[in-house]
Image (spheres, rainbow, N blue to C red):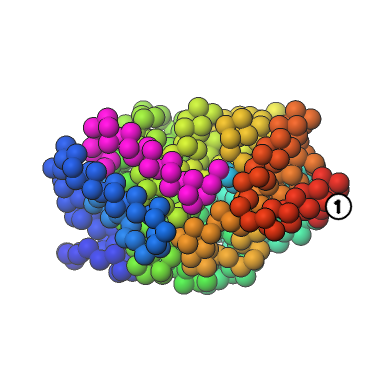
Amino acid sequence: MTVHRYDPASLHADEFINHDEILETLAFAQAHKDDVGLCREILKKAESHLAPAKDHCAVITHREAAVLLACDDAGINEEIRRLAHRIKLAYYGNRIVLFAPLYLSNYCVNGCLYCPYHAENRDIPRHRLTQDEVRAEVVALQDMGHKRLAIEAGEDPVHSPIDYILECMRTIYSIKHENGAIRRVNVNIAATTVEEYRMLKEAEIGTYILFQETYNRERYEELHPTGPKSDYCWHTEAHDRAMEGGIDDVGLGVLFGLEGYAYEFTGLIMHAEHLEAVHGVGPHTISVPRVKPAMDIDPDAFDNGIPDDVFDKIIALIRIAVPYTGMIISTRESQSVRERALRYGISQISGGSRTSVGGYTQEDRPHDTEQFDVSDQRTLDEVVAWLMDNDHIPSFCTACYRAGRTGDRFMQFCKGGQILNYCHPNALMTLMEYLVDYATPATKEKGEAMVRRELLKIPNEATRARTERYLSDIAGGRGN
Ligand code: SAM
């Protein structure tokens, strides 16, 4: 039997997500969880991200982050929430990027025990969108005002091979309907080869997103008994292959509820450390899905569900430990959970989502092909208005991507705290586009007031004047 050591720079999953290191970390965290002095020291180290020389500061380690997670001192927990909020504002301001998932196909050859797409589910109607259907779905999404999609598909080499995914991407980018255009297509498909990642890069992928589901190898193997996804190392090493294939931006995530949260949280932070160690650039995004009831899935089969207060704390600690990462929360979560999560660290949310194949072109929300129950069922316009009520700027910006600020260039930009100087005006302009083209009158009124308020926050006079000019061009129908 091979004995694996811990090495964040290794390309072997059992070494960079080393099980013994996670167990030792959890034991260390339990031993120190009541040490309020140590927790304060760790928070102080994390706070140094807010100082001017922040890009030279050490990020807190997975061990330190695990101690904070284990600590149940009310005062420390309050300090964690406050610091997360400050780091979020320092790196991302009050902007929230919006996107929608687009389900292409629910054919799947895997046996994931928590997912209704699993191959043994004979009750779910299977469908894969034709290119005409992709077009109709995208037009419907553009009609709402979306500019950024995450495409999703089950794994099936016959029904959704890489050529099918690439064809869908080409179709999506080619739709220049008068109602707008999709400017960034993120892709959430199963782990694949370097060669296929290269093809996705050529097809102008945004972020390659792949959730680990669980970092505990034994639990992973129980939950994925059949299909290509059952290979833990193939799955866990996928982000490295994606980066080797030239994809700059990769997204991590855990499906919380499958395994104890402290184990998952530690694995996730170690994975971020690994990407930094090997590629010099951490995860572009981290998603925090929680397992949801779904067709043919026994909700009682997963007894690791995490209460909302722990979920909030995990979000805050990810923001503190990986301050530059984009953080995503989906419509799996309710309005109230999302409201708190935005405060502690989330920078991207989905809105108006349908998780069924072909869902956007149907009048009523279809349930029979849904991947999971959607908790937040509001329209995009309602989500936009709610964000503004909570003083967040809804942003449809994709400028970094178009200006080539991806991967390490994006991270330098972000770590240097520059996002604020560039992103604020861009967010306001894309919000104005949304207000002019898609918003209901009430949302438009609210949004115009917000744009006027937020414009004054641009410190550089010339930038402010230029932004004001662009905004009035957009309002007058002269924008692009
Ligand atoms: N086929 C790709 C793969 O295997 O990674 C994409 C998967 S799927 C379309 C996207 C994600 O949905 C999965 O990675 C999983 O974390 C999540 N998911 C599956 N079943 C779920 C459930 N019952 N509740 C919440 N999320 C679920």
Q: Position of residue 97 (x, y in %)?
A: 59, 46
Whether 472 is among the magenta residues is no
* Total numbered badges shown on the rendered structure: 1
Q: Position of residue 53 (x, y in %)?
A: 39, 62
Q: Which quadrant: the C terminus? A: bottom right
- Nearer to the camera, 154 or 408: 408
Mark 1, secondary structure of its residue: loop
Q: Position of residue 273 (x, y in %)?
A: 34, 60
The amino acid sitting under disc 1 is Arg
The residue furthest front is: 461
Whether 69 is among the magenta residues is yes
Residue 14 found in image quarter = bottom left
Q: Which quadrant: the N terminus? A: bottom left
Q: Is residue 258 found left or right of 408 in the rendered image? A: left
Q: Is residue 397 found left or right of 211 in the rendered image? A: right
What residue is at 27 percent from the left and 36 percent from the top?
A: 76
Residue at image mark 1: 478
What residue is at 37 percent from the left and 70 percent from the top?
A: 278
Q: Is residue 382 found left or right of 45 in the rendered image? A: right
